[in-house]
Structures are given as structure tokens and as C-alpha cells.
Amino acid sequence: MATKFPVKGYWFLPNHEENRIAGILNVEGDRFRLELFGSLNGNSHETYLNSLEREQSKNTPAIFGRGANGEGYSLPNCISGASSLNLNLEFPLTSFIVGDIVAGCFLEDPNEAIFKKIRVQYSHLQEWLGFTGITRTSVDESGFSLEYKYPEPIAIAIDEQYKFTLNYKYDYQGIDQYRREIAQEVFVDIESQISISYLELSKQISLFCDFLSLATLSEVKVAAIKLFWDMDGEQEQSNRPITLDVFLEPPLPYPPTVKHFSKFLF
């Protein structure tokens, strides 16, 4: 289920869903903000004032949420933001600046070693690779044919633990009888030989982003992330891992400008 912002729902601390608070998770510039109609530590004025200094001085370990569509959300890195107390209201208005968003599960401990694979799409990666599976064949006076074949994946062993695989997918759309569109996308599968935590696996995202920024002499953005959770055979219907959407920054509002490879460093 694709996540669309804003996300309206109920939000709560781990193991305290009975104290859930209505709120909205939304994009604010280049970051995420969670605005709550109440306090996670209690809605009385006295309880809120006693907890205010404590909230401002440290990060909240994690906040869970359940969207209006029923999907679960984990916000493992939150910092208390602007809040207000109106004595004419029965509850305070609180907010948090949100670092990461994991959609599809409640991830209570981001340090728990339960993941092996994460898939990332970066801006400028496709231009840097320069491969396309689209070819024009059978060209003559009567017309031509188009053919699409997946380019061969490129596997790179970073060390004894991590393997990076550059792979492709495509989307075909028949807009109408006069227009057909094939859109190719490239992504990076980052895999660990052993189960590691979400935080350790996500560090590799930044390392490859820094490398690609240097190679393309461009600001590289993370366009999409999927985290694969293999529950070790606990699933009843399929052995396929659960796929979770991850957001480290707001989705790109528009496609990045295509940069010619001649302007890359290497």
C-alpha cells in the first residue's frame, strides 16, 4: 500500500496504544513533522508541563502510528518540536520533527538484527550507468519495431559481508492507441550475508549516496527505499519477505534534471 502524505491517524508510544493521540504526519519543506492533538505523556495541563522539559532535552525513542487506512508506521528518530498549551483547551498541541519513517510495521528496536536486504533508488544513478534495455529493430521503409530486454545486473562485493547489485525494472503504459511509453528505472539492492539492524543496513545507503554524488558531481537524492523483512518462515502463505516502505526524506516533488555523462567526474 503506497504511502501518501499527509498521513492522518492515531499515534502512540510503544506498548501504550491505549493512550493513542490523533495527529497528522506531513511534509514540511525538506523534512517530516508529526503534529499531535494532545501529548503522548498525558493530556492534563499539569502532566504536560511536568514532561515538557524532559521532552525538549532528549530524543523520543520511537513513536508508532496507525493511519486512517489501517497501515502501521514506525518513527524511530523523533525530536520534540514546537508545542503550545492553550488553557481554553482540554489538551496541548505538540509536535515532533521526524527523521526516519518505516511504513508497514511497528519497529520497536531499530537496533534489532532482523534484516538482510534493502532496495534503494537514487537520482542520477540511471544516467551514471548509461545502460538501456530499449532497442529499435527491423528498421525499413515500412516502419520499425521496439524491443525491451533487461540489462544484465551488476553485482559488486564490497567486503565479506555486503554485496551491492545494480538492477533494473521497467513500466509499460499504453496511454492510448497513438502513444506507448516504456519507462526504465534502476535500483541498488544492498544485501548483508548475516542479519543486521535497520540502522546498520541504512548506513550503507548514505555511503553509496556520497559515492554517487562524487561520481556525478551532483546532489544525489534518495528517490525510494524498500526494506525486506524475512521472518524466518513465520509467514503462513508465502516464504517471500515482507516489503516495507522507508522514507529518510520527503519524496521528490518532481523528477530531477537529467545530467549528461560527459559532465560526470567518472
Image (cartoon, rainbow, N blue to C red):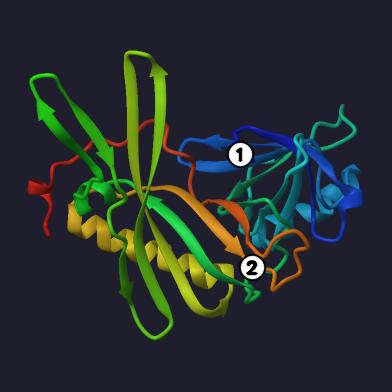
Residue underneath mark 2: 230
Tell me the residue at 69%/63% (across/down): 61
Picture coordinates of residue 110, whole percent (x, y): 63, 68
Q: Which residue type does callout 2 highlight?
A: Asp
Residue, x 46% and y 71% (percent of image)? 191
- Pick whichever of labels 1 and 2 is earlier in the sequence: 1
User: Image quadrant of residue 205?
Assistant: bottom left
Amino acid at pointer 1: Thr
Q: Does 12 appear above or below 252? A: below
Q: Residue at x 60, y 33 (%)?
A: 5
The residue pinned by badge 1 equals 3
Above or below: residue 117 compared with residue 104: below
Q: Residue at (72%, 54%) from the top-left corner?
A: 63
Q: Quadrant of the N terminus?
A: top right
Tag 1 secondary structure: loop
Q: Is residue 6 left or right of residue 260?
A: right
Q: How many marks?
A: 2
- The reply to whether discs 1 and 2 touch (Cβ–Cβ < 8 Å) is no
| Rendered location of residue 88, percent (x, y) | 87, 27
Give the spatial CA distance, label 1 vs label 2: 21 Å
Mark 2 lies on a secondary structure that is loop
Is 58 or 246 nearer to us in this picture? 246
Picture coordinates of residue 162 (x, y %)?
41, 77
How far from the left and from the top, in percent, is residue 28? 53, 35
Position of the C terminus, as image quadrant, is bottom left
Position of residue 88 in the picture relative to residue 232 (left or right): right
Q: Quadrant of residue 37?
A: top right
Q: Furthest residue to the bottom?
A: 160
Q: Nearer the viewer, residue 217 or 150?
A: 150
